[in-house]
Image (cartoon, helix red, strand yellow):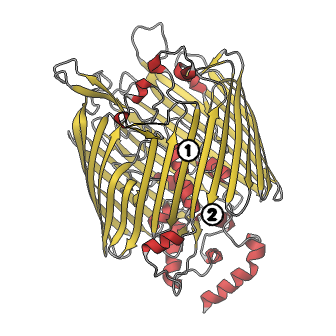
Amino acid sequence: MIKYFILFLILTFSRSVFGQNPTRPEIDMDRFVQDLFSQQSENTNYETMYEALFQYYRYPIDLNKASREELESLYILSPALIVNFLDYRTKNGKLLSIYELQAIKGFDKNIFEKLLPFVKIIDDGINKDSRTLWERIKTEDNSYAIVRYQQTVEPTRGQSPNMPSDQRYLGDASQLFARYRIQSNGDFSLGITTKKDAGEAIQWQPSKRQYGMDYYSLHFAIFNRGHLKTLALGDYQVQIGQGLVMSSGFYLGKGAEPVTTIKRSNQGIRPYTGAMETGFLRGAAATLNFKRLDWTNFVSYRNLDGNVRTGIDTITNNDDYVSNILRFGYHRTERELATKGSIGEALAGTHLLYSSETKNFKFGLNSIYSQYSVPFNSPQRTYNYYDFRGTNNYNFGVDFSYNYQNFSFFGEYSRSKGGGNGLIAGILASVHPKIDLALLVRNYDPNFYNFYGNTFGEISLNKNERGIYWGVKYTPSRKLNFAAYFDKFAQPWLTSRAEAPSEGYEYRLRINYMPTKKITLYAQYIDENKQANKIDNTTPQDYIVNQKRTNWLFNIDYKAEKLLSLKTRVQFTSFKQDGGTLETGIMMLQDVNFDFKKFKVGVRFSIFDSQDFNTRLYVFERNVLYAFSMPLYQGIGTRSYIIMQYKISKHWDVWAKIAGFQYRKVDAISSGINEIEGNTKTDVTLQAKYSF
């Protein structure tokens, strides 16, 4: 009775407390990404994370069924808030309204607004769907089709008829993308994605693995069929433990959110829907549930791109071998096309996960085996002495998570063929309603091999590294919060950039302040210190020195009533190595966005001055739906864009974007087959989406 009285009060006053619109709002993806990806790097696959983030928005989590792992995967709620939510749901039963969240301790207006785009309430009691799967697929409204066209206006060297035939584009300069997907959350998912990059040809040549468009991805998955928790056919990803061996989905690591983002949630099998041509499996996967046990099995066979060469030493005995895997997915020239699908990869794995009755303790066992049609044998150098060589690899290990009140403990250990070990363990803690803490340690041997892993680390390969990380977030009020982390790391063996064992550290300080609902300000400072080879062409032998890179960021967002929003940003970076001169880079931008309901338009103008690659800058910018854009700012010049979206009808949406760089003091942009003569580069994007 008390619950219904509280709900009555919430619904009565929700107009004044939460605003007038009771439906899920359209997400401000620009703001959300800036909060999470505040400092960008070329080492992170942001496009895959961005795709996963959009899937959470389009297919929100049902709060009445959401597990701890699903709530953690949003990176919005602290351990204390997740505990408060689960306790409330256990004691009071299913939520009757989204607005009931405000009755839970700690769920203030700020948390509510961040969470709202990604969650929903479903009452499937008397309305539970009893139709067959085929009938549900035929009549499902939650489906859409997208077609996208992109092109750089200025011609590149790859388009020139004067280029050698094996380096000349086989197709035109357009990039084409199309996708169809139909999904019912927690029931089924079916989709197909196809793409061709600029310069790739649309042609049918099975002998060269060309079947019209250059890339296709197809998946079909069903969920929650008795003991069958998940079945995926086609392209899929698997997330196990902390992602030390198998990793997929949305993961950030170090960022503006220093606490919740360091832990991965055990999400199991997920359909793959992205346009990236690497990082997924192709075959079949299934998870069976037996009360407290989840048993996941998966098999995959794919053809990977790689440089296959003839052996020239006694190790390879003049047989073919793989010097390196190519992950860009470009097949624009005869030379690139020759690498397409040149390596066969067969993979199989299993994961057995035990959960306690309360779900607070979980323990998993996993093993994975991979086999390649051509042996790996990269040319041996001192720094790559521990690189993987051979035709097969295996991993086996354990993972765990334990939640006690406002504390969350987690970790994973794995051992690969040859004896290499990988270990990661951490703690998240809400020690006070206003203070959240994080501690994480990791140790990855130089000979630890994990081809589909992606967990916390300074080096994306999760090998040859050890380190310790501390994070803290302090929220004295709804308007103000402070966030910081410190990460100390070391590489016990050589790397391509350091001809000796090296070490370093990085720390970040960030202040967020929201004086009014319309104004948001934040300032951030990052200091990164690493050891690397001295950049000095006059020295005949490399030796390592300390290199320091700093980054300052100031950002102001202003959102006027409904129609207008503004963003002003200044970003400054510097780089210096011992004995060298100080190098600097600076970028300033101004965004102006208009929202006329059916018609939206955004404009950006930015100026930048970056001395060289060491002081490069990355800045997220708006793009058409499901497309990600984070251009690199290097040199001296300006960048501007205009993006427009128009909702023609209930079913049709269209987008158009024109963006361009204009550089000073240069005669050409980029290099190789991507080189453009002149000092301007202009990109055009057109997209249409039909919602069924």
In the rendered structure, find residue 60 and report the number of the disc placed on it: none
Q: Categorize mark 1 by other alpha carbons within 10 Å: few (<14), some (14-19), many (20+).
A: some
Q: Amino acid at mark 1?
A: Phe
Quadrant in the rendering for residue 427:
bottom left
Quick check: 194 left or right of 388? right
Q: Tell me which label, 1 or 2, sits earlier in the chain.
A: 2
Callout 1: SS: strand
Alpha-carbon distance for marks 1 and 2?
A: 26 Å
Q: Position of residue 515 (x, y in %)?
A: 77, 56
- Indicate the position of residue 603 as horizontal and vertical percent values: 77, 42
Q: Nearer the viewer, residue 312 or 532?
A: 312
Between 598 and 255, the one nearer to me in the picture: 598
Q: Is residue 519 visible?
A: yes
Q: How far from the left and from the top, in percent, is residue 502?
A: 39, 28
Q: Is residue 3 above or below residue 36?
A: below
Residue 492 placement (x, y as % from top left): 33, 32
Q: Which of the 4 quarters of the picture holds residue 685?
A: top right
Element type where label 2 sits in the image? helix
Q: Judge by depth and name the residue closer to the eye, 478 or 458.
A: 458
The quarter holding residue 13 reads bottom right
Q: What residue sits right under mark 1 in the picture?
A: 177
Q: Is residue 245 above or below residue 210?
A: below
Q: Residue at x 41, y 63 (%)?
A: 221
Q: Quadrant of the C terminus?
A: bottom right
Could you tell me which residue is drawn at 40 percent across and 41 percent down?
Answer: 467
Callout in the foreground (1, 2): 1
Disc 2 crowd rating (10 Å Cα; few below 14, some 14-19, many 20+) is many
* Residue to which mark 2 is pinned: 117
